[in-house]
Image: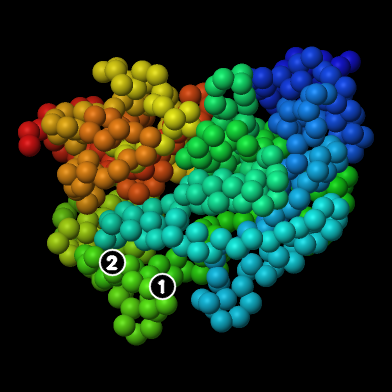
Amino acid sequence: RALGRAPHDIPWERLRGYERRFPGCVRPWNRGVNGAGEALRERLAAVIGCPNLLARVVPYMPRIDDASPLPRIAVGLSGGVDSAVTAWLLKSAGFDVTGVLMRNWDEAEETGGECSFEKDQRDARAAARAVGIPLTEVDFVKEYWHSVFEPFLRDFDGGGATPNPDLACNRHIKFGALLDHCSRSLGADLLATGHYARIVRIDETNPPQLLRGIDPDKDQSYFLASVRGESLERACFPLGGLTKREVRELAAGPANLPAAVTRRRSSAGICFIGRKRDFGDFIQEYLPAEGEMRDDSSRGDRRGEDSLRGASGSFVSVESGEAVGRHGGLSRYTCGQRARLGGASVPWYVVGKDSRGGSNSVYVAPGADHPALFTTSAAITRCFWVSGARPRGMDTDRGAKLSAQTRYGARAVSCTARTMDTRSKTSMLVPSVFCTPPNLDEVLGCENEDVAAGAGAVIEVIFDTPERAITPGQALVLYDGDECVGGGVVLYPGCTELELSRTGKRGEDSVSTTT
């Protein structure tokens, strides 16, 4: 009886395998179930078996109707279990599916030997054979270098920031270059991936909404926050209603995927670094000496004895203002990271970095919960919005009540976000003294996608409770409930709890300044 109802009406607590209440769909799948939709559901029911799982897969499959042919779907195969199960679900439902494997980084050039892509290639081919779909391979090394890696290097800002290339990869490569390639070269109507996120469509006149995945430990909406709404129109995330454990069980059970795929560890870290490489050693092969401008010359000249290396500097205590050790370069450290000072009786943690005038200071504090690590405010810029517009209320003095996620895997905290009129540089959020001060003239003079230059180019975010280790260069993603509305790149954190306690201005998050 439950399977005969629309998915949003299913009494989740009565279904076998119930663990917790799952939110219903914003738009029920095939509300008036037609012949094509019923046939698809029956095919999935035959292979999945469990009504609970079926009810959480069906809403996030491509919508179909009797009047239109089944869409052709390209699946981004990586060799991992998530993309393989995605392809299996779509193939089992009767869609015309083609697997696509991307090559974004030439690791053989770095190591001189076998690279991780070759393992991805073997596993992706094995998964495609098991599912029974063709597999094509496409090279986006050049596109990745110019659209993701070069901006990633620039965003280090002399070592004072810690950028995250994963959002740019999803925006420009997976749901940019790959999506266009699948449409033009493969004739695909949709691109499906194994992301743990959900896409829902309220109606045909509004852009789709991006929602968190059901599994709170694997939700990947944070990494998808900068993907354009028009790209999400042609995207599909069949795993959005499942947990990672359930996906692995499907892979090893009904899907009968190869052991190399089902036992493969989840990907971790930045794609061009992976698990085993030291980030600091890697990135300093590409960055100029901190405090110098980067020479965007040919890629082939970046290695060797003449490569510019990150300059060393001092660890500076936030309590005494004195040097307490030496470090090997700003780019090796990020806010909240263990500083590993030799001979220290307690662990020290990075509070911030200052690259002004070649000082190359890394501010540190003793203890993981030191007040210098916490702040109740941040300024973000270079904003991106899923719908193409800022959330309602953000342009008012009171701002918009949302929740903020400051890094992948972090809990979301309630916040208020409002645009700041930066044309006169008044009423700007005061930055922490433990970071590199922003150059507002440079910020306001650069192009800012989806946000008009001048008024609204910077967003002030005030957290209801102090947040730890707000990091310049990282993405701060905003949510309205489960809906990911967009976000921006952290320009600077506001005054820390330590600073506010010293000045007696705790709770006063901004002051008026004059040019």
Q: For the view shown, which residue lies furthest in the right direction?
A: 46
Image depth: mark 1 or mark 2 in front? 1
Residue identifier under label 1? 299
Q: Is residue 498 visible?
A: no
Pointer 1 with pointer 2, Cβ within 8 A: no
Please tell me whether mark 2 sits on a helix, a strand or a loop.
loop
Percent x, y of residue 106: 55, 70
Total label count?
Answer: 2
Q: Quadrant of the N terminus?
A: top right
- Residue at x 16% of width, y 54% of height: 320
- Residue at x 38% of width, y 56% of height: 151
Q: Is residue 120 visible?
A: yes
| Dot 1 or dot 2, earlier in sequence | 2
Residue identifier under label 2? 294
Residue 307: quadrant of the picture: bottom left
Q: For the view shown, which residue lies furthest in the bottom direction?
A: 305
Q: Estimate how packed mark 2 is, as few (under 14), some (14 to 19) or many (20 or more) residues with alpha carbons within 10 Å.
A: some
| Rendered view: 497 above or below 251 | above
Q: Estimate how packed mark 1 is, as few (under 14), some (14 to 19) or many (20 or more) residues with alpha carbons within 10 Å.
A: few
Q: Along the horizontal axis of the image, is 213 left or right of 340?
A: right
Percent x, y of residue 464: 36, 26
Percent x, y of residue 226: 47, 40
Please tell me whether mark 1 sits on a helix, a strand or a loop.
helix
Instruction: Return the residue nearer the eye: 319 or 185.
Output: 185
Give the residue type that dot 1 points to. Answer: Arg
Give the residue type that dot 2 points to. Answer: Arg
Q: Along the horizontal axis of the image, is 152 left or right of 275?
A: left
